Image (tube, helix red, strand yellow):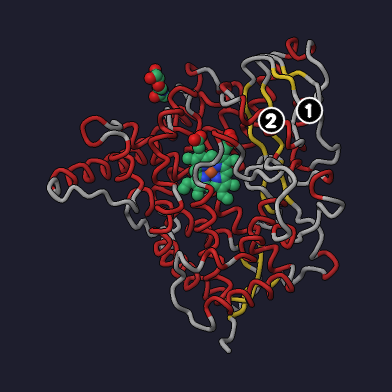
Amino acid sequence: MLWQLVLTALAIGAAYYRWSRRRLYQLKAEIPGLPNNNPIFGIALKFIGNSEGMTDPAAIELVSKTCLVKDEFTMKYFRTAIGNGSIFAPVNIWHLRRKINSPFYSLKNLNKIVPQFDTQSAIMVDLMKAEVGRGDFSIWDYITTYTFDSVGESAIGTKLNSQGNPDHYLLRAIDACTHMVAKRILQPWLHPNIVYKSLPVYKEFQKHLEGANELLEETIKNKRTEIRENKNAKKTDWSIFLDVIIESSGGMNNGYSDMELREEIMVMMVAGSDTSATGVCFTAVLLSRYPEVQERVHLELLEVFGDSDRAVTAEDLPRLKYLEAVFKESLRLYPPVPIVAREVRSDLVLPSGATLVDGTSVMINIWGAHRNPAYWGHDAEQFRPERFLDGALRHPAQFVPFSYSVRNCIGQTYAMLSAKTALANLLRRYHLLPPAGARADDLQRPLPVKFDIMMKAADGFAVRIEERKTI
Ligand code: HEM
Ligand SMILES: *[C@@H]1O[C@H](CO)[C@@H](O)[C@H](O)[C@H]1NC(C)=O
């Protein structure tokens, strides 16, 4: 899983950066640490020594609002693939791009593309029929091609059909590039350009990158031609990110260059597909293990849809309140992005009184914050979706799967709508069951996840499905 690899690279890169500046750190006051048994930091902790990962919502709030610079040490390698694309861009570049990209992501606009989520996830659910009665299978491939196809369609208005063809060229190229960048970060001897560029892996990297870029450049060229020829119609198609950012950046002549358009499309596809897929997969696995929760979801679906298999619409989604609580509870226990790294650019006093000194690289420990018993109670480790129906949370930064404040995930509403639509279609049609061999008393234990090179469900998101009989 690509995004997890990116994260590990980030964590280890940041740790390496910190280590390389260790004298600086000896000067600084004690920092609130992680719980000792935190599974996420298995390796990273060994690099870091005493950890700076923070789990206190008040500290997370302050750092998220104050520190907008991402970890420069790792960013420069990601930039070899996505240039100045907003997610890893320097703050001055990011700021303008965020403004330009935002109109696409408003709820009002995203409601228009729910029909795309419905059509794409209907394809997914149909393909999955092949697994009925066949025992354990990994649901990951189905979900990740769904998220890739729907993000692709939203980004450039093209049906990529990776669901019918998992070896889709663009999917493979993006995957390969991200893996190669992450590997480079993990292997310091590959850092100097003079070394890296002399190796065969660099040729491979360039091949995939140029392939993906060419495809996107071609799309952008065609779009520009189309807009020129349609001059009189002068309508922006608000369901397509590319069309929206041409318009919101100042139009054909004054707006984003072809390169800027390409970078932002690439960012959307990289940031939007594996993250969502991970969230939906963990939700499916949890539902397979908590039959009473799955039944309650199904009752809610019956209330909204009856036994009809009609399309899911934007109006249906706000009514699926319990399903939303289930998705959030899954993101709480298994946040697809378990840490984010930021840089401190001037001394910062945390609510605890500790000082983060200028030049420190700091990790926000989302995983830890989501299991902090001071905010979630003694049952913090338990899967209990109802906690999201019980009223307001105690602190706005105690639940931060999409990070927090101005540099948070711009796609969080998109992710919610897409996931709820796909889960509604999946759960209306199928009954999810745990792997055949699973022991009953293991089912409600914490899921084994690995974070050695990447975070993943140790069993590759194995479930079984049965078709639901309509009433
Ligand atoms: C469950 C799904 C998702 C999760 C858990 C997630 C998580 C995150 C996190 C944690 C960040 C911020 C990192 C930081 O603070 O340093 C982020 C940034 C971002 N995400 Fe998401 N994301 C998800 C889905 C999406 C989707 C569906 C899209 C687009 C369609 C998207 C687009 C972006 C972009 C463009 C950024 C960079 C924003 C900026 O710097 O202005 N994400 N995401
Ligand atoms: C990012 O933008 C800066 C400033 O405009 C430019 O110097 C740099 O070359 C760009 N980086 C990449 C990788 O395109």
- Which residue shows up at 50% across the image and 46% down it? 411
Q: Which mark is residue 51?
A: 1
Looking at this view, name the residue that lies furthest to the bottom: 471
Disc 2 C-beta below 8 A from ligand 1: no
Name the spot of residue 447 as percent of width and height, x first. 75, 56
In the displayed structure, would residue 5 be above or below residue 77?
below
Type of amino acid under label 2: Met
Residue situated in front as seen by the camera: 51 or 319? 319
Name the spot of residue 402 as percent of width and height, x first. 60, 43
Crowd class of label 2 (few under 14; some 14 to 19; many from 20; radius 10 Å): many
Crowd class of label 1 (few under 14; some 14 to 19; many from 20; radius 10 Å): many
Asked which secondary structure carries label 1, the reply is: loop
Q: In 3D space, how far apart are the residues under numbered discs 2 and 1 (Cα atoms)?
A: 9 Å
- Which residue shows up at 69% across the image and 56% down it? 329
Could one spot residue 271 in this view of the protein? Answer: no
N-terminal of the pair, mark 2 or mark 1, is 1
Q: Is residue 85 left or right of residue 337?
A: left
**Residue on which the image places disc 2:** 363
In the displayed structure, would residue 26 be above or below residue 224?
above
Asked which secondary structure carries label 2, the reply is: strand
In the displayed structure, would residue 385 be above or below residue 427?
above
- Which residue shows up at 21% across the image and 45% down it? 222
Q: Is residue 417 left or right of residue 263?
A: right
Type of amino acid under label 1: Ser
- Given contact means CB atoms under 8 Å apart, are the residues at marks 2 and 1 in contact? yes
Could one spot residue 285 in this view of the protein? Answer: yes
Name the spot of residue 308 as percent of width and height, x first. 49, 82
- Which residue shows up at 51% across the image and 26% down it? 77
Quadrant for residue 92, please give it.
Answer: top left
